[in-house]
Every structure is written in C-alpha cells, then in structure tokens.
Image (cartoon, coloured by chain):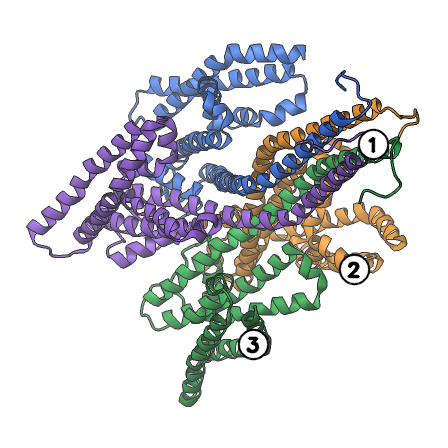
Chain colours: A green, B orange, C blue, D purple
Amino acid sequence: MDRDRRRQQYEQATQWPMIGLAVLFVVAYAWRVLGVGLPGWVETTLGLVTVAVWPVFLADYLVRLVLAERRWRFVRTNWVDGVAVLLPLLRPLRIISLVRVARVIDRRLATDLHGRVAGYVTVSASLVVFMAALAVLDAERGAPDANITDFGDAVWWAITTISTVGYGDRYPVTGEGRVVAVLLMLAGIALLGVVTAAVASWFVDRVSDARDGESDDLRAEVRELAAEVRALRAELPGRDLTPGR
Amino acid sequence: MDRDRRRQQYEQATQWPMIGLAVLFVVAYAWRVLGVGLPGWVETTLGLVTVAVWPVFLADYLVRLVLAERRWRFVRTNWVDGVAVLLPLLRPLRIISLVRVARVIDRRLATDLHGRVAGYVTVSASLVVFMAALAVLDAERGAPDANITDFGDAVWWAITTISTVGYGDRYPVTGEGRVVAVLLMLAGIALLGVVTAAVASWFVDRVSDARDGESDDLRAEVRELAAEVRALRAELPGRDLTPGR
Amino acid sequence: MDRDRRRQQYEQATQWPMIGLAVLFVVAYAWRVLGVGLPGWVETTLGLVTVAVWPVFLADYLVRLVLAERRWRFVRTNWVDGVAVLLPLLRPLRIISLVRVARVIDRRLATDLHGRVAGYVTVSASLVVFMAALAVLDAERGAPDANITDFGDAVWWAITTISTVGYGDRYPVTGEGRVVAVLLMLAGIALLGVVTAAVASWFVDRVSDARDGESDDLRAEVRELAAEVRALRAELPGRDLTPGR
Amino acid sequence: MDRDRRRQQYEQATQWPMIGLAVLFVVAYAWRVLGVGLPGWVETTLGLVTVAVWPVFLADYLVRLVLAERRWRFVRTNWVDGVAVLLPLLRPLRIISLVRVARVIDRRLATDLHGRVAGYVTVSASLVVFMAALAVLDAERGAPDANITDFGDAVWWAITTISTVGYGDRYPVTGEGRVVAVLLMLAGIALLGVVTAAVASWFVDRVSDARDGESDDLRAEVRELAAEVRALRAELPGRDLTPGR
C-alpha cells in the first residue's frame, strides 16, 4: 500500500518528462528517416538521441516495477509500457497516457467507456501507422528490389496492411520490413477486434436496457412485499411502540 | 428545453429540403463524373451545384448546433451530419435520415433494433460504395499509370476494398484516390464491426432468454412469499378490517 | 392459426421433394459447367433442367407466403428461401433445411445453439463456395483475358475471397464473375460475423455463469426470508390449522 | 463414472509421452523440410519418424474414446485431438495441453478466462503458422512456377494469410500448398473471431459491473425486508423462545 503510493507519486512526477521524451524520440526518428541530404553530424546526433532514449525508458519501467506492490499485476496492467520498452517502434504509445490526462480534465470521459475506447483506438492506430511507415521506409529504402520508396507509399502500405485489405501493390521485401508488417497485422487484428467489441457491447447494452425493466419489476414486487410486512407489523395486537431497527 | 424544442421544429421543417439537396448533390456529382463529352457549360453548372451545396450544409449544421441545448452532446449524437459537412463524399449519408422517416411510418421498425441496424448498414454501405467509386474515378482518370479507368472498375474496386478482400487487381495511384481508399477501409472496418456486433447481440439475446427463465423463477418465489405474508396477516387474531395500504 | 397449420402441413409434405429438386439443380448445373465435350443434346437438357427448376421454387415460395398467417413475418424468417428464389446460385441453400431434419433426429442438437450454428455455417459456407466456383468458372471461361480457367482455380479463388484474404493471383474480369464475387464477399463478411459472434456469445456465457452465482445468492436469501415468515406464522398465538393457500 | 476415472488415469499417465511424441514429430518434420543436402539415410529416418507417429496418435485417441463414458461428448470436447489425428499439420497442437499443465501450476491462470484464452491463442497461432510454413515449403519447393521457395518466404506468406491481409506477393500454386492455405485461412477466421470475442466479452463485463450495482441494491432491499420480518417476530405477544429454524 505504502509502496504503491510512492509509485503513484513517482509516476505523477515523471509523467510529463516521459511524454516529452517520447515526443523527442518520434521527432528525432522521423527527422532522421524523412530528412534527405542531412549533414552527417545532424544524422549522427539524431541517431544518438533515438538510441539514448532507450535506457531512460528501461530505467523508468524498472523503477515503477520495483515500487509496485504486486509486480505481476503491474506487468499485466501496464503491458503497453512494457512493450514500449522492448519495441522502439511502439515507444510513442507512451503518449497515450495523455488520454488519461484528458480524462482527468474532462469529467464526461471518465464515465464514458465507449468514448474513451474510441479515443484510445484513434490515437494509437494513428501513431502505429505513422511509426510503422517510418520504420518500413527506413528498412526498405536501401533494398534493390523494394517497392516502398517514399513516405507517401509507406503510409499507404501501412494503412492497407492495418486494415487487412492488403492490395499487394506495395509490400516489404526485407526482413526488417516484414517484421514491421507482422506487428502491423497484429495491430490490425486487435483494431478490428476492439472496434467490433465496442459496437457489440453498445448493442448488448441497448438490449440489456430492455431487460433492466424486468429487474425493476422484481424490485417493485419486493418493495410491495416489504410494505405488506410493515402493515402487518403495524396491525399486531401486542405491539409496543419502539421501532424494530 | 425550450431551445431544444425550437431545434426540433427547425429540423422537421428542413428535413425534406436537406434530403433534396443531398440527392441533388449526388445527381450533379455523378453526372459530372460519368457524363463523357458533356458540353462545357453543363460541366461548369454541375461543378457549381456540387460546390454551392456545401455552404448550405454548413449553415444548416451550425444553426442546429447553436439551437442545441447541450452542444457537445449534439456534436456526438449527430456526428454523421458533422462528417457530411467536412467530407463531400459522405454528404449523401444525409439521406439515411430517411430511415428515421421510415421508422415513423412502420411501427415495427421502431422497436426492432436489429432490423433497423440492417437497414442503416445496407443503405449507408451502398451509398459509400457508390460515392467512393465516383470519387476514385474522378481522381484516377487523369493519372497516366492508373488502372481504375471506368465506372465498372471503380465500383468493383470499391467493393473489394470495403470488404477488406483487396485483390490488388485495381488500386488507386493518386493521392486523392488513396484518401478515398483510406475512408473506404475505415468504412469497411466499421461495416465488419457492425455486422458482427448485430449477430453477436442476437446470439447473446437468445442465450439470455434462457437465463430470463431463472429471473422469472426468482419472481415467482417472491410472489409466493408475498402470498404467505398476506395469509399470515389474514390469520392475525387482533386484525382490523382496513387494508394496510 | 388455422392457415399457419395448413402451411406447416404443406411444408412437411413438400420438404423432401424440394430438397430433391435443389440437389437435382446442383447436379445438373455442375455437370453442365464441369462436363467438357458433352454432346449437344445433353448440354441442352441440363440447361433446361436448371431453368425449369426456377418456376417450381417460385410457386412453392408463393404458396407458402399465401398460406402464412403473418406475411411480413414469413418473409423475414424465411429470407433464405426468398433469396434462393431470386438467386439461382443460392438455390442449394434449400438443402440447409436438412439441418432442421437432423435436429429432429438428434435431440441434443435441438438445445445446443452453438452446435447448430456451427452446422449451419459449415454446410452453407461449403455450398456457397462450391456454387460460386461453378458460377465464376461458367462466367470467366469464355473471356479472353480470364485467369480463372479450371475448376481447381475457381474453388481456390472462391475460398480466398470468402475468407477476405484476397491474394489477387486469381480474380474475375467479367461482369458476371464480379457479381458472383460481390455475393461471395457479402457471404464472407457474414461468415466472419457469425463465427465471431458464436465465440463471443460462448465467452459471455462463461462469464455470466460466474454472475449467476450472485443471482443464486439472491434466491437463497429470498428463500431464507420465506422460511422466516413461515416460522413466524407457525408461532402465532391465535393461529388456526387451515393452510393460508 | 468408473470408466471415466480410468480414462483420466490413462490420460495422466500418457500426457507427457504424447507431448514428447508431438515435439519429436515437429522436430523430425522441420529437420526433413529445412535440412538441405541431408544424407539419404537421415532423410529416410526422419520421414519414417513422421509417419510412425501417426498410428500412435490414432491408437491413443481410440483408447480414450473407448474409455470415455459419453463418447459423443468426448469427441466434441476433445475435437482438437481428433483433428490432430486426421491432419498431421495440426499434430503439434497436442502441445497446447501444456497450457493445461501451466494452469495447474499457476493458480491465477485457473480463474482468469481472458488470460488463459490469450495463452491458447498465442501458442496455437504460432504453432499453426510454423507448421503451415513448413508444409507449404515442402509442397511448393518442387513446383516449377512456385514463388514460395525458402523458409523466410513461407513464414511471411503464412502470416499474411492467417491475418487475412493476403498481399499476393507470395501464394501457393500446387494443390497441397492450396490445401495448407485453406486451413490457414480457417485458422485466421477463427483467430479474428476469438480475439474479437475476448475483447467484446471484456467490454460487456465492464458494462455489467455497473449493472451489478443494481443487483446489489435488490439484495440490500431483500435483506432489509428480512430484518423487518425478524423484528416483527421478536415483537410477537405469544412468542415462545425456540428459534424458527
């Protein structure tokens, strides 16, 4: 309990710096990949920044893990942060914690599960597509028989992949590019699953509203019964005047 | 409350004109795209009509927004209309409000959630495919390496995309065409989600019917108990004849 | 009520002949499409059979519709039969009513919603793939730039389409072939929806089982209360010996 | 009952040997397919091992079937094992029973339906992709116009297929390869279904938690009523001191 409170204090103190680092990582990575004809020292610096961010993310994760009361539970509920440590590509997902910040600001979001899910899905799908496009472009650009050669193509390919449409007009041919593709496909399956599930739960909710009426009927009958018992008690011949409760 | 009533009056008064405008937009756009060898002045007029419709849609949306009691709620529950203002392609979705009209006419539809969803899905998927085919044809036709060059191909491509099949025998190569494709893919994911959710909620409903039996059992027991209490009251020695309630 | 009983009598009397006709249609159609180098009179006869089956299906549907107590309800609950009248391709779906026959034989199936759905899905998906492969082969074979030219290719194409994988190594190029493809894609979306929904409802069922425990707790409490009331009644001083109910 | 206990004893005794056989099968099959330039006798031995495993699997299945109390139920609840007998490709799925072993070790898994499903899905999807890649490589390698010619390509193709993306840059051209592809597509549909269903049931669960509050309210009212009745009983004039229950 005590340790968990310290973890929360730590997380509140480091939230904004960590989001800042994630943004820095995205900017440096995007600049390095998209900036054509950069001077050598700029490219080196950008590369150093993207690499240097990693130990900070790792240390942050380990500190939080050590401070957590129940470690296994921490790993499971914060799996996005764990993945962000392992896969640089997914590091910007750290920015999603901004949704949590938004939730504190806008009270409505705190109770609206579907709205919150829509927010998470939109933000993370966009981030994943953007990072995957950068990563695949970085991997494919040098390959001789590559067909993904500029950023427009890369974004287009990423969207056709995450939506599981997969025309096949663009596809990765290098090993790194294919690894990026596999992660995107997993994201696509998850995306489809979450969208469907959100719609389905909204539906079931609507149908349940009708059922709730029945539950209310039951409550009304229990109340009526209670009134009957109270009346019975009031009529008792030998009743004293002190209440039963 | 008062303002919301005025909004409803406004909406009832403008519903048919707005549907008419949406139809006019579709006809003008389709004519301009599909009509080969139109005289110059006809093409100019049709282009003007498609452009002139936009400020009317925007004004209508803003008036309704201003009249709405709770603005944020209005934006969320009428997001289709908002999207129709931003994306000309989706403007004909305004026609979907016809389903609402049909609901008033056919009482059965008003209570049949699944039937209504089927109606919405069929009408909007058809409209989206039709408009996307027109838009992609308009965008691709001029490109030198395009493979979507007639309306048949465009419709075929739109259907393979929205169903996420994506053969890749036809695909857009221009930026505008790809934007249309991305919107279609989003529509495809939503389509899959809604169809699955409708089937799933029907299933859960069926299974819940069995559970409802149990809830009925509980009610029967509560009723039996109430009868017991009533009998008890009737047997009381010092009872008077006035009812307890 | 009376009319609906007559409809059921009619349906029981015609069920087997209609299934026989559906089988005959499939056999004749498959023979005509797959039989290379058939003598002219055989091909003419097979063509005649496939055509002659249609008015019988139409007449059967109309008779059942006329005999139905509530016509709109009949159209909705028997939409598969209606589709089978309109689309020759889907005529063999009539064979699915065999599942209904199997249900009568095997009592277990009658109560097992998930098992029944699995049966329907397997049988209809197989039939749809088989018929679509025949139809697309029939349509494409004559086209000069077709890439679906033998039955193996046609079945392979049909499966890649219904599963929404869509490699694009085979795809229809004729108008008829594309219509078949669109129907297959719709079937694929429905297939995905039904499979997902069946799994989801099984899940929700499992989770609900845990909740049911809570409902049982409530019933236990109501029963305890009833025992209390009964005990109270037994203790009453002025009680007579006739039961309250 | 007696026979079912003997079946359980048999299953406990043979579980580890059968898992060992499944692993042996995978190793031998992978070695034979991936090992280029193996001496003739090694290839023959590996081929013999993969074939010899089959009768053992069949015998094991039949023994368990014979020992089962209710045979039809056994076939249905152990359909994975039945499929593993029929399709060599799916034999390693026997390894999934390790998840059952893990469940006994880790108590948390035993109650966590979603975690368990995530485990099953990850393990079986990985196994299916790995075996399908081996099988398709084995089938395609010899074909003259094949485009899946090394293991990297085969794994890449298997993943694009199971995720239903289907770029079409790689696809099987032989009959055996296409059969493998069809099984993979079925696995992909099932995968999508299970992922979506797990997410959906988690959602519905969350929404139900809110509803549970209402059920708790009802229980509180029933308890209050019981207290009322107990108070009534305590107040009775002619009460004796023996408890009612």
Q: Identify whether B181 is placed above or below C133.
A: below
Asked if labels 3 and 1 touch by Cβ distance under 8 angstroms, the answer is: no
Task: Using a 10 Å C-alpha cutoff, classify the residue at mark 1 as few (fewer than 14 neighbours), some (14 to 19) or many (20 or more).
Answer: some
- Give me the residue at 70% from left, 51% from top: B25
Name the residue rendered at 84%, 57% in the picture: B67
Q: Is residue C100 above or below residue A203?
A: above
The CA span between labels 3 and 2 is 38 Å
Considering the numbered disc 2 on the image, is that residue within a helix, a strand or a loop? helix
Residue B71 disc label: 2
- Indicate the secondary structure of the residue bearing disc 1: loop
Residue receiving disc 3: A10
Do marks 3 and 2 share a subunit?
no
Under mark 3, the amino acid is Tyr
The percent position of residue B1, horizontal first and vertical second, equals 88, 53
Give the residue type at disc 2. Arg
Label 3 residue SS: helix
Q: Amino acid at mark 1?
A: Pro
Which residue does the numbered mark 1 point to in the structure image?
A: D237
Q: Are marks 1 and 2 in contact (CB under 8 Å)?
A: no
Horizontally, residue D47 falls left or right of residue A18, namely left
Name the chain letter of the residue that bears numbered label 3.
A
Q: Is residue B76 visible?
A: yes
Q: Which-is-in-front pick, marks 3 and 2?
A: 3
Nearer to the camera, C215 or C221: C221
Q: From the top left corner, tell me how far across and down residue C17 is, in percent.
A: 46, 13
Q: Nearer the viewer, residue B32 or D61?
A: D61
- C149 sits to left or right of A97: left
Residue B223 marker: none
Residue B53 position by quadrant? bottom right
Q: Chain of mark 2?
A: B
